[in-house]
Amino acid sequence: MSEKLRDLHDDVFGRMRARGGRQWRIAFGVCGLFTLLLVGSLSWTIYKGIGVWGTNMPAAWAFAIINFVWWIGIGHAGTFISAILYLLEQNSWRNPISRLTETMTIFAVVQAGLFPIFHLGRPWFAYWLFPYPDIMGVWPNVKSALPWDAAAVSTYFTVSVLFWFTGLLPDLASLRDHAPTRRQRILYGLLAMGWRGDARSWRHYKVTYLMLASIAAPLVISVHSVVSSDFAIGLTPGWHTTLQPPYFVAGAIFSGFAMVIVLAIPVRFFYRLEHVITDRVLENCAKLMLITGCIVAYGYMMEHFGAYYTGDADERSLMFGFHPTSIAFWMMISCNVLAPQVLWLRRARRSKVVLLIVSLLVLLGMWLERYVIVVQGLLRDQLPSAWGNYMPTIVDLGILAGTLGFFGLLFLAFLRFMPFIPVSELKEEAVLE
Amino acid sequence: MKGDLHSLVPRVEVTRRAALKLLATGVAALETGCFERPGDREIVPYVQEPPELRPGVTTRYTGVLSLDGFGYGVIVDTHDGRPTKLDGNPAHPATLGGSLPWLQARILDLYDPQRSREPTMLGQPASWAAIAAQLRALPRGPLWIVMPPQTSPTIAALLARIAARHDLRVVTHAPLARTAVYRGHELVYGRPLEQQLDLARADVVVALDADLLGTGPMAAAWSRAFASRRKPEGGPRSMNRLWVAEPMQTPTGTLADERLPIAAGEIAALATLIAAEVGVALPASLGQTAQARLGERAASWARHVAADLVAHRGASAIIAGDRQPPVVHALARMIDHALGNPVVMTTPAVLDPLPTHGLDELASAANPGAVLVLDCDPLYTAPHLHLAGVLARSTFSLHAGLYANATTAACRGHIPLAHDLETWTDPRALDGTLAIGQPTIRPRFEVASIIDVLAELAGVTLDARTLVHDQLRGQAALDVFDTAWTTALRTGVVAGSAFRAETITPTWRSPATDALAALLAPPPANTVEVALAPSPALHDGRFAPNAWLQELPHPITKQTWGNAALMSRATASALGVSNEDLVRVRGPVGEAVLPALIVEGADDHAVTIELGHGQHGPAIAAGIGTDVYGLGDAMILRATVSKAGGTRVVPRTQIYMAEHGREIAPLVTLAAYQRDPKLAAHLRGDQASLLPQGGDRFKGVQWGMTIDTSICSGCSACMVACQAENNVPTVGPEDVAKGRAMHWIRIDRYIEEERVVNEPMLCQHCENAPCEYVCPVNATDHSPDGLNEQVYNRCVGTRFCANNCPYKVRRFNWFAYEHEDSRSLQYNPDVTVRSRGVMEKCTYCVQRIRGAEHRAIVDHRAIQPGEVVTACQAACPTGAIQFGMLDEHDTAFATMRASRRRFEALHDLGTRPRTQYLVKVTNPKEGA
Amino acid sequence: MRCSPNPVALFTPTASAVYRGVVIGAVVAVGAALCAPMIYIRTGYASGEGDPVEQPIEFDHRHHVRDDGIDCVYCHSTVETEAYAGIPSTERCMGCHGQVWPDSPETAPLRASWETHTPIRWKRINALPDYVYFHHGVHVQAGVACASCHGDVRNMARVSKAHDLSMKFCLDCHRSTQDSRAITHLTTCTTCHR
C-alpha cells in the first residue's frame, strides 16, 4: 500500500523535477517570444489608437471580442471538471486532470481579460464600468450587459483562483517536504501556508473545497450566459435571440474540453503519465466533447430555423444569403459539427492522434463560430447602405498569436514548478481503494 | 501622399503625449484630471473692448465669395473675431440662403496651413512692397494678365486704367467658363447674352446635359426655385415635370421625372429633333439627320418631350449644359421662342464673355513681355499649351494664388492671394446683382488681392476698400450714398443693381445651320465618347487642397479622395473590367490611367471622368486621383478606352445601393399617390407592443426633423455644413476605404433600374433608442426634449452603441483626428472637439438648441418656432430638411410633418425615430 | 505519512503569526490603494479649493466690493446675459483709476497696460474643463447668487476657489430643484456637455 503511494509520489514529483530539459526550454523560449509580440502589439495599440486594428464601421467589434469570447469559453472546462464533476463524484477520472484543467481555466481567463480592456477606445477609463463612488455623480448603466460582463468575468476569475489554490495546498506541502534545496523548501513552504496535514486541517480543507466547488459550479453556467447577453441584447441580426445563453455555454464547454485534450495528451506523453492520465480519462473527455458538440450543432439548426420561422427579412437574408463570411461559416460547420462525429467510434476515442486532430479542429471551429456571430451580423444589418467589409490587420493577428504564446508561457511555467497532478487526491483515491 | 496626410494631421505626437501621460499617472492623477486647478490658465481681457464684440457671442457679417467671377453672397459667423461658419445670404440672388458644398468648405481654406504664406521672387523670400514696386515699375511694353472671368466693376475700371499705360492683353481663362453659352446666344441674338431663368414659373423643365441643380453659378438659387414646384400636396400645378437627358447621372438627374441616358455628343441631335417637333423653323435635312443619328428610344423620348412642351406652351424652360457646343444653346433659345416662353435675356455679368485673347495666343507669343497669372493654374488646366516656355521667355512673370501650384514654379515671383474673407471685393451674381465683400479677419500673413495687384499695375495708390467704395459711389444708382453703402454692407447686396432685361428675339441664321450640320455628322469610328465633367466638390480643381471637399462623398458614386472612369455596367463588361480595375484612356492629345467605376444609370456609349484631380500642387491634393486635362482641349472628347491591368482602391462611403427587398426609401408616382394618399401609413406610427410606447416620457418642447426625399438632389451641401458646424474631422483615403469616414450626416443613395432616391441619413434620435441601453457608462442618453445625447467626455469607447444602431450613423474616433494646427481656429467653440477613442454622432446641433433656450431664458420668453435652425437645414438649397418643435403650427416643418407621405426608416424595428422622411414622389408623363 | 528528509525546522514558531499578519496586511493594503484616490479627489489638494493665487495686480475685492460697495455687475458686465461673466478691460479699470490713485504703485501695472496697450494677464481661479458649457446669464436669471459658486468674494483679499466645481457639485444643485433623480431639462447631459 504505502509502496504504491510512494511510487505515485516519486512518479509525479520525480518526473516533474527531472523533465525540465531542452524541449521544455525551447518551448518556453518560443512562447516567450510570442508573449513579447503580445506586449508589442498592445503597446502599439495604446500608442496609436484602436485604429491600428481592422475594426471599422459597421464592424465596430471584431477580433478582440472574438478572441475574448473564445478564451473565456476555453476557460470553462476547467471549472466544469473540477467543480461539477467533483460534486457529481466522478473523481475516478476527474482527479488525474483536474489540476491541469483548473490551471488552464485560470490562464485562459487571464488572456480573455486582456481584451475587454484594450478593446476600449480609452482603456485608461476602463474602471468606469465598475460602480464606485465617483465625484461625477453618475453610475454605470445596469441596463447594459457590459458592466455585468465585467462583474461576471472577474468573479469567475477570483473564485477559480481560490478553488485552484485551495486544491494546491496539500501538494505544495508535500513538495515542501521533499524539496531538495532549502530555497525551494522555503518557497514552497510559504505557498503551502503552513499546511501540516493533520486531521483538523484536512477537515477544514474538505469543507472549504466542497463549498468552493458548489460556488464555482453555477458560475460555469452564469459567466458565459452573461457573455452571451453582450450579443443577445443587441439589435443586430444574428445576435438578437434568446438561444444565445445555452448555446454559448455548450459551445464554451465544447471548446474547453477540446483544449483539455490538446493539453493532456502531450503532457502525459512527455511526463510518461499514461498510467495516471489513462485512456479512459481522455475517452470521457471525448464523450463530453461529442455531447456538447451535438448541443452546439442543435444551436446552429435552431438559429436558422428561427430565422426561417419568424420570417424576419434581415435574419433570413443573413442566415440564408451568401456573405463575405460564408466561407468561415462552412468551415465552422465542418469543424464543429462534422469532425466530432467520428467520436461515436470507440476506436477514434481511443486513438490519441484522432483525438488530438479533432480537438484542434474544434478549437479552430469555435473561433470561427465567434467570428461568424460577431462579424457577419454587423456587416449585413438592417440598412444595406451601411453594409461593409472587414479585414483584420497584422496587429490583430499579432495579439491573437501573442495570447496563445502568453498562455503557453504561463502553462509551461506551471508544469515546471507546480504540482500539475493532484497527488494528494490521487493518493486519497488509492487509499479508498 | 500618406506622408503628406500625416503632416496634415499631427495625431501621433498628440496621441503619444495623451496616452503616456494617462498611463503613467495612475487612477488618482486621472481623477484629478477632472479638475482645472487655480492658476492653470490665464484670463486676458481687452485693453479696450471693441464695441461690436462680446466674448462668446456669435457676430454675423455679410460677405461674398467668388467662383469663376460670379459672386455668391454669404453670411459669415464669427466667434471672438474668428470666422467659423459660412451660410448662403438669403438676400443674395445666387444663394437665396442655400449653400453649395464648396461654399460651405471655403471657411477651411481660410485657416489652411498649406496656403502659401510669403511672397517670393526668384525663389527668394520677398515682401509685397518690393513686388508692388516692381509692378509699378513695369516697362510700358506688352503685358499679359491671365485670370479667371471677372465681374467686378472695380476690376473693370482698373483694367481700363492699366490698358492706358500698358499694351494690355487680358486672357480670361477658366476650364469651366460659360463661353459656349455666350457664343450660342451670339449665334441667335447677334451678341453674347445671359439668360435669367425663373424655374418657379416653369411647368416643364428640360435639362439637356445640364446639371442645373448641382453645378453652375445659380445652382443653389435654381434648386430653391425648382423645389418650390415639387409639392405633391399642393394643387394641380404644384408639381412641375423634369426631363433630363445626360450621359452620367447628376444630382439633377436623380430628381428627373423622365430621364434619358444619352452620350453628351448626341444631345445636339436630341435638341434638333425636339426643336423640329415644337416647330422651330430649321432646314428639314437637319431634322432627318438628327432622327437618323438618334436611337429609337432617344427619338421617341424627344417626341414625348416635344409633346409635353407643346402642351405647356409659354410655361417651360429648356436648359443646355455649359459644356454643350454653342449651337445647342442657340437651339434651346429657339425652342423657348417657338413655345413663347418668357425668356429674360440680359447682358452677361462677365467682363469679356467671348475672350478676346486666348491662352494659345499667349503660348505662341514670341516675346510676351510681362505675364501675370492671377488666381488660376494654367500649367495644370491647359497642359497641352506648355506655357512654361512662354513664362520663361517673359521679361517678368508673377503668380498670385491661394496655394503654390504647378504655375507657381514656372513664374519668377509669387504672391499669396487674399482669401475672399480677407479682402474687399465687389463681384456680380449671374443676374448682375452687385455685392460688397468686406474682410471679416485680418490676413494671418502677407497677402494681396487681385484688386491690390491690378491697382499697382494701374499706378493707383489707394487701398482696396477705397477703390471698391469709390467705384460704387461712382454709380449713379445710389443717391444718398453713405446710407446706401452701409445698407449694402448690412444686407450683403447692392439694391437694384441687377441687370434689366433686354427686349430682343432670337433668329436662326445660316452659321448656326452649318455649325449644327457639322455636329450631326457621325463621330469617328472605333472611338468612345469621354465626357469630362466638373467635380461636384473640387470644381475645376481649385478646391483640391480642401480636405473637406476631397473627403466629401460624390453625390452619385460616393467616391472620396479622387476620380474614376465612370461607366455603365454594359460598358464595363464590354471592356472586361469591374470596379477599381484600371483602364487606359487615350484622348486626342494625351492619355490617362485611372480606375473604372460602374454607375447605374450611366449611358452605355459614354465614359465620364471628372476634372480637378491628380495635381502636383498643395500637400493633400498631390497625387490624389488622376489628371485628365491632358486628354484634349475640349470637354466632350472621342477617345479609346482599354483595360490597363492592375487595380486602384476607390475609397467609397457607400458600396451597396440596392434596397435588398427592404422598404427603406419608397418612391411613388404622383398618379399613384393621388390614387392612394395613405400608401405610407404602414411605415409610420406605433407598433403593436406590450411595452408603454413613448407616452408621457416626453413632455414640453419636443424636437424633430423631417426630410423630403422628393426634393433632395444629393448635392451634399448639408454634409459640409455639418462638418463646419460640429468640428467633424476628416480621416484621409485609407481610413475612408476602411469604412471610417466621420460625417454625421450622409446621403444614402438607393437605385434600382431608373428608380433613384437620395435619403439623407443622420441620427434618427429614436424615442426607443437601441444605442442608449447598451452603453455601459451612460455616455449616450435621452433628453426630456427628445434628443439622443452623446457625451464625449463620458465615452470610454466600447462601440456597443455603434453596433446596435440599425441606421449606422455613429462615428468613432479611431485615431486622434483633431487638428492642432491653424485649422483649429475654425473650430466652433460651442462644440466639444472630440479626442481619440470616443464615439460621436449627429446631435441635432444641440449647441444651437441650448443657445436658443439660453437666449429665451435671458429675454424671459418662450422659444419661438423657427428659432432653432440646424446646420444641415440652413445649408439645404431645396429646403428638403426641416427641423422644429413637434407642436408648432403654420411652419414649413409643421406642414411637412403633417404630410401623408411621412414615413419612418426601418419602421418595423419600433425605434420611433424623431427624424422622419417624406416618400419621394415623381411626376412621369403618361405613356412616356 | 513520510516526514521531511532533514529534521531542521523550516520556520520559527513565530513565523505563522508573521505570515498571517503579512496576508492580512496585503489585503488591507489593496483596499487602501483603492480607497485612497477616492478620498484624495474629494480634498482641496486635488481641486485646489481654497488656495489663493498671486495675480499680476494685487486686486482686492474686499476693498472694491465691501468698502466701496461697487456691484459685481459693474465690472463683470455681461454676467446677467451672456455665457461669460466678463473680466473688465483695462479701459474699464482706468475709468476710475484715471482719477482714483492715479499714481499709486499698486495700480502701476494697470497704467503700464494702458500706456503700452498690452493686456493684463490674470490668473484664472474658477475654470471648468473645455467639455463643460456653463452659461452665467441663465444662472443669474434663475436667481442663483454669485456666492453660491464663487463663495464670499467680497471678503477675499486674494480670490480663491470656493468649491471644487466637480460635476457632483453642479448636480447637487441641479438635482435639488426636483424631487426625483429622473432626468429633466436641468439634469440631462446636453445641459452642460455638447
Image (spheres, rainbow, N blue to C red):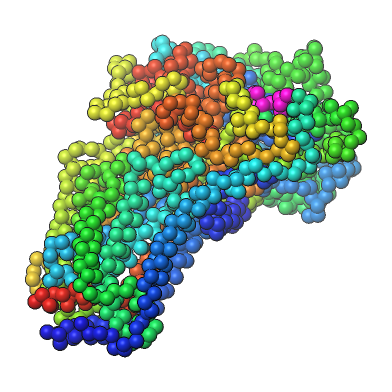
* Residue B428, quarter of the rendered image: top right
Residue lying farthest to the right in this orientation: C103
Residue displayed at 63% across by 19% down: B91
Q: Is residue C185 left or right of residue A11?
A: right
Q: Is residue C184 left or right of residue A204?
A: right
Image coordinates of residue B14 in percent, x first then y, are 59, 53
> In which quadrant of the rendered image does the N terminus of chain A lie?
bottom left
Image coordinates of residue B353 in percent, x first then y, are 68, 29
Question: Can residue B427 be seen in the rendering of this structure?
Answer: no
Residue displayed at 16% across by 40% down: A309
Residue displayed at 28% across by 72% down: A169
Q: Which residues are magenta?
A: C71-84
Image coordinates of residue B399 in percent, x first then y, are 75, 45
In the depicted view, which residue is nearer to us: B218 or A300?
A300
Report how many numbered discs are placed on residues in the image: 0
Residue displayed at 65% across by 47% down: B821
Was residue A84 drawn as part of the magenta stretch in this picture? no
Dominant secondary-structure state across the stretch colored magenta: loop
In the depicted view, which residue is nearer to us: A14 or B365?
A14
